[in-house]
Amino acid sequence: DAPWVVFVSPPWAMFNDRAADLMALVAAVLAAAPAGSTVVVESDTSFDAATLPDPDAWESRAVAPAVLHIHGRVLS
């Protein structure tokens, strides 16, 4: 399968109001993505990237007023 590029950019309130659902969605995307895929999660600056699935595999980049969390080493 060809690699995917996936952007997860929910309303930022979801990171507080529905955090468990949102992290389950990200985990499901990571599990389903073909090798070589890139997953990007956009959040506001208050989100703790340590709560992302496989937190050490993400690179975070500030792009005011957002933060992009990039996972580019998906291995299926």
Image: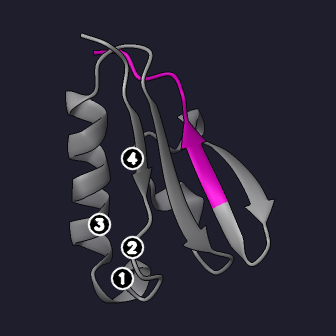
Pair 2/1: label in front: 2
Within-10-Å neighbours for mark 2: few <14, some 14–19, many 20+ = few
Drawn side of residue 6 relative to residue 45, left or right: left
The CA span between labels 4 and 1 is 16 Å
Looking at the image, which residue is at 32% across and 75% down? 19
Label 2 amino acid?
Pro
Residue topped by disc 1: 14
The CA span between labels 3 and 4 is 11 Å
Colour pattern: one colour
**For residue 52: magenta?**
no
Label 4 amino acid?
Pro
Residue topped by disc 2: 10
The CA span between labels 2 and 3 is 9 Å
Label 1 amino acid?
Met
Q: Which residues are magenta?
A: 68-76
Label 3 amino acid?
Leu
Residue topped by disc 3: 22
Q: Quadrant of residue 57?
A: top right
The CA span between labels 4 and 2 is 17 Å
Q: Secondary structure at mark 3?
A: helix
Pair 4/1: label in front: 1
Q: Secondary structure at mark 4?
A: loop
Q: Position of residue 23 (x, y in %)?
A: 31, 60
Q: Earlier in the sequence, mark 3 or mark 4?
A: 3
- Looking at the rendered image, the quarter that the C terminus falls into is top left
Q: Earlier in the sequence, mark 4 or mark 2?
A: 2
